[in-house]
Amino acid sequence: MSYDAPIKALGETSLLPEGTTAHEVTETIAGVTENPAPRGWWLLFLLSLSALGGMTAALAYLFVQGVGVWGNNAPIYWA
């Protein structure tokens, strides 16, 4: 494959180490999604999922009770 060789006259260098094949690059990149997620990923996912549940509950409370739950119940004094 001469089209992917660096042009030495322009000072280009190879992006991959010598002997690296396209199969090895594909396995490295695809391995991120094909391997099981680590335990820390699941813990942070559950934490963010619980935060989403809390936000959903807060929005449901807001829609049921109205904007008065914001505590902005002062009358308008400029009129």
Image (cartoon, rainbow, N blue to C red):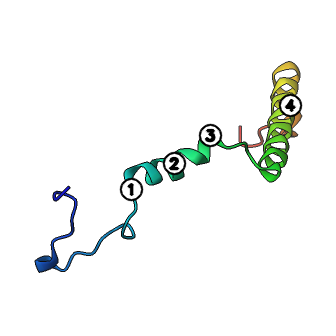
- Mark closer to the observer (2, 3): 2
Query: Label 1 sits on what residue type?
Result: Thr
Residue behind mark 3: 34
Q: Identify the secondary structure beneath mark 3.
A: helix
Q: Quadrant of residue 61?
A: top right
Residue 65 to residue 71: above or below: above
Q: CA distance from mark 1 to mark 3?
A: 20 Å
Task: Residue 48 in the image: state x and y as whole percent.
Answer: 79, 43
Q: Which mark is residue 68?
A: 4
Of the residues under marks 2 and 3, which one precedes in the sequence? 2
Q: CA distance from mark 2 to mark 1?
A: 10 Å
Quarter residue 11 falls in:
bottom left
Q: Secondary structure at mark 1?
A: loop
Under circle 4, the secondary element is: helix
Residue 73 showing in the rendered view: no
* Front residue of this view, candidates 66 and 63: 63
Residue at x 85% of width, y 45% of height? 47
Quadrant for the N terminus, please: bottom left
Cα separation between marks 4 and 1: 64 Å
| Residue for badge 2 | 27
- Numbered badge on residue 21: 1
